[in-house]
Amino acid sequence: MPQRLKLLAACLGLLAFAAATGCNRGQSGSQPPAATIGGSTAASPSAEGPAGTSPQKPAADPRHPEVLIETSLGNITLRLDAEKAPLTVDNFLSYLGAAFYDQTIVHQVYKGQGILAGGYGTNLVEKSARTPIRNEALNGLKNHRGAVAMVRQPDAIDSATSQFFINVADNPALDYTDRTPAGYGYCVFGEVIAGMEDVVDKINNVPVHDAAGLDRTPVQPIVVKSIRRIR
């Protein structure tokens, strides 16, 4: 099995473990709270303009850039946290700026746990990534429902490159616990602020199968048409 597939299988194994040990609170009948970044809620109210005028867009915050993921099943908006995960956000924005994510796919889906993207083209061939980055999992951010985190090799703390996943449930087994490779966790660097219920959850429930060396890949490809910064 290629090295990249090994890390994906291991990461997803941890997600499955989280569900098996009762960490998947999304099955309790009520939705877990959306992840928050730096104490902010998942949605920020727009600043109102003078009476009779249209609301003014809030000023861009360089510490919390927002990006739009356009997929074949709808759009997802992320707010990133460059304050708590500066290296990870810079790495993600660098891939984004190089159009690396354009015409890639959501390549693995674990129902009730998470969806993975950012590494495979529409031909199911893995894309060449750059040098791995330092793991910033020790930043206080948690793998809650709606949190966006980096995929890495389970036996190498600093091994994340381009691939990321969106948590669809609380997955505390993926959080930092200690400085060992197994316990260092998966770095959260942002959150979904739009498109969680109508797009992410929809993706998480599509039929999957094993194909081209990838397990649990969507039967009908879910294409990431582009990821671009919007604020």
Image: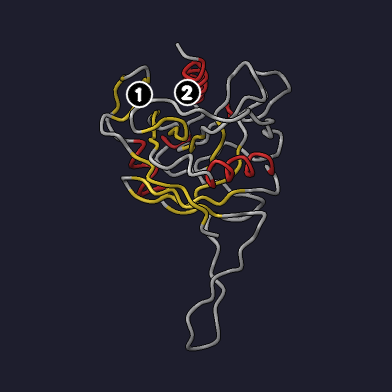
Q: Earlier in the sequence, mark 1 or mark 2?
A: 2
What amino acid does circle 2 point to?
Leu
Image check: 20 left or right of 140? left
Residue drawn at x 30%, y 27% is 208
Residue drawn at x 59%, y 19% is 154
Distance, label 1 to label 2, CA atoms, is 10 Å
The answer to whether the residue labelled 1 contacts the one labelled 2, judged by CB atoms less than 8 Å apart, is yes
Front residue (pair 85, 114): 85
Of all residues, the one furthest to the bottom in this rendering is 52
Packing grade of label 1 (10 A; few <14, some 14-19, many >=20) is some
Percent position of residue 42, x then y = 53, 54
| Mark 2 nearby-residue class (10 Å; few <14, some 14–19, many ≥20) | many
Figure quadrant of residue 144? top right
Q: Which residue type does callout 1 highlight?
A: Arg
Could you say whether the residue bearing mark 2 is in a helix, strand or loop? Answer: helix
Q: How many marks?
A: 2
Image spot of residue 120 (x, y percent): 42, 30
Say if 218 sits above or below 57 in the image. above
Position of residue 89 in the picture relative to residue 217 (left or right): right
Residue 89, by quadrant, is: top right
Quarter holding the N terminus is top left
Residue that numbered label 2 is attached to: 12
Between 195 and 145, the one nearer to me in the picture: 195
* Image spot of residue 109 (x, y percent): 38, 30
Question: On the image, numbered disc 1 is attached to which residue?
Answer: 216
User: For numbered disc 1, what is the local secondary structure?
Assistant: strand
Check the image and report above or below for 25 versus 22.
below
